Amino acid sequence: MLLKGVLLVVQALQLAGALDLPAGSCAFEEGTCAFDSVFAFQPWILNEEGHYIYVDTSFAKQGEKAVLLSSDLQAEEWSCLRLVYQITAAPGSPSHPSQLNLYVRFEDESFDRLLWSAKEPSDSWLIASLDLPNSSKKFKILIEGILGQGNTASIALFEIKMTTGYCIECDFEENHLCGFVNRWNPNVNWFVGGGTIRNSHSVLPQDHTFKNELGHYMYVDSVYVKHFQEVAQLISPMTTAPMSGCLSFYYQLQQGNDNIFSLYTRDVTGLYEEIWKVDNPGNANWNLAEVEFSAPYPMEVIFEVAFNGPKGGYVALDDISFSPVHCQNQTKLPFSAVEASCNFEEDLCNFYQDKEGPGWTRVKVKPNMYRAGDHTTGFGYYLLANTKFTSQPGYIGRLYGPSLPGNLQYCLRFHYAIYGFLKMSDTLAVYIFEENHVVQEKIWSVLESPRGVWMQAEITFKKPMPTKVVFMSLCKSFWDCGLVALDDITIQLGSCWSPERLPPPPGECTFDQDECAFTQEKRNRSSWHRRRGETPTSYTGPKGDHTTGVGYYMYIEASHMVYGQKAHLWSRPLRGVPGKHCLTFFYHMYGAGTGLLNVYLKEEDSEKSLLWRRKGEQSISWLRALIEYSCRQQHQIIFEAIRGASIRSDIAIDDVKFQAGPCTEVEDTTQQSSGYSEDLNAIEY
């Protein structure tokens, strides 16, 4: 329950009148604007005195949801969505706290994308600032409140506001200060200056925005400094979408005083980087600063003033803005991580080798007991080192990646498979080379790995100088020179293990954490099972999952079933939308007695229809399936596995993904068995 006393805070925080709020916004003064509670869930209640809506345990139970849905919106320009909210809880630390989630529902997608989530209780109103990149697609905002444990749990929304511009921009004219916060220091802090309420320390005659004494700005003053190196920090909201361009702001410094005014970025791991510092105090008026700013992953901007004594004077700040165009008309393009990635289906992309000879060979093989297919599709290309053409004792094969700019954090992921080595040490290693190739550092090497299984490696690194990633394979001796396979190298900006990363959208499932939103009508020995590693029966089933090699997948255990018995795995209900959908997944059908794997579409109140089928043994490798379909009604996808003639008929699936729009690639069926061409309406077991 919300205390009535918070209404005083609410009135002080009032952001804008309900009448002039832009589309996608609401102040909840007299109603919920164009936002409606979804009938299938608990309603959001409008407070009797206005100002906010809420859901609490006086009329709902723990675990129940209240869902608020906006009307159709469009953001053809970059927009910022701000949410003022409060989560309250009973005294103590409940094991199941309340949770507030915000989703974006695009018109052509059959699932909702989680944009932001919070569950930390607070005794005051909090502000979340979320960047919405420009898009021509229509969308809706969906806000979901889930009540937690305790008889006084509540969730309240004070305002939703969607405005054109970047969340990092601010002129400090509104009470919420655009989500900027001051890091409290007992002696020096950033304060709001200007406006109708004046004090002796707000010494500027006018702000920069309106050029008068009623406008607002932020300032910090040394009048209360007691020690050397006192620091005041003004911290921006965390960016939530990649952005790169020119960050500009206006500042004033009191001349002739000893202070240091700097600008830093800070990522989610707490790593600081200075990107600007005052060289000279400038004139007594407002000075413009322009700073090259790149936020390829979530980060904050911090305006910091450090004083060396009580006579440090003041620093004032106003009108922070951002432009995606580089400062001073620079034409430098931002780094594209896609250019540093490769699946080797067409060529080596931007990778290259030593001039000495081909240490790595691009190959395409038919999967067998001794050699798996590629990782990308199961029947494509990958790189192989230490083949019969290059396996000379002492030979080193080096594969160089493209140049990576310095001072950025990277997440390197790749898949590898090892065949036949007696000792693993340095069989495959990854080095970082500086541009001059003088300094090199090993950042990863294989230790022990199952033979013939595609394994995923993840490495996070950051270097001050431009660098290249180098994959190195070593052939130690004639007797210890097996094969090293490499595929699907990807580079992403940011940490591989960033705590701020949101879970994958509900349209994707790797089964590594759980079964996602998939369900089964019944669960017994003949159902689908979640498993990691090999299946119990020899000569059937995968050796590991497709995602990482050591994760989980779903499969049927044929030894628990009888010939012709079926297991069904149902997706969550998917919203019907116009246009095409693309369903991709990986399947594993290896074993002499393998039965059938069917994929059905089930609409409400209608019979299921067959979308895709495979019959009999397909490959010892994971193979990729692409299914394109259309459905304007709510529907579900059903994976049906049918046990074959013998216990060697385990069937597995992994890495299921639903995407809006048509499939961009046509599935290569040249590696499929003759079972593919059979009549899809053939009689089932």
Image: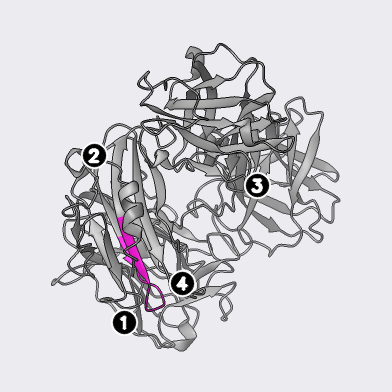
Lower position in the chain sequence, tag 2 or tag 4:
2
Residue with the mark numbered 2: 74
Task: Name the image quarter holding the N terminus.
Answer: bottom left
The alpha-carbon separation of the residues under discs 2 and 4 comes to: 39 Å
Q: Secondary structure at mark 1?
A: loop
Residue with the mark numbered 3: 460
- The correct choice, above or below, for 430 with respect to 626 in the image is above
The alpha-carbon separation of the residues under discs 2 and 1 comes to: 39 Å
- The correct choice, above or below, for 185 with respect to 60 in the image is above
Report the amino acid beneath label 3.
Thr
Lower position in the chain sequence, tag 1 or tag 3:
3
Q: Secondary structure at mark 2?
A: strand
Q: Magenta stretch containing residue 145, yes or no?
A: yes
Q: Nearer the viewer, mark 2 or mark 3?
A: 2
Report the amino acid beneath label 4.
Met
Q: Magenta stretch containing residue 510, yes or no?
A: no
Name the residue located 74 percent from the left edge and 60 percent from the top edge. 420
Marking on residue 554:
4
Indicate the position of residue 534 as horizontal and vertical percent values.
59, 73
Name the residue located 57 percent from the left edge and 39 percent from the top edge. 189
Indicate the position of residue 256 as horizontal and vertical percent values.
66, 16
Residue with the mark numbered 1: 521
The alpha-carbon separation of the residues under discs 2 and 3 comes to: 36 Å
Q: Secondary structure at mark 4?
A: strand
The alpha-carbon separation of the residues under discs 1 and 4 comes to: 15 Å
Report the amino acid beneath label 1.
Glu
The one of 351 and 457 positioned closer to us in this rendering: 457
Indicate the position of residue 26 as horizontal and vertical percent values.
23, 48
Contact between marks 2 and 3 (CB within 8 A): the answer is: no
Magenta span of residues: 144-157
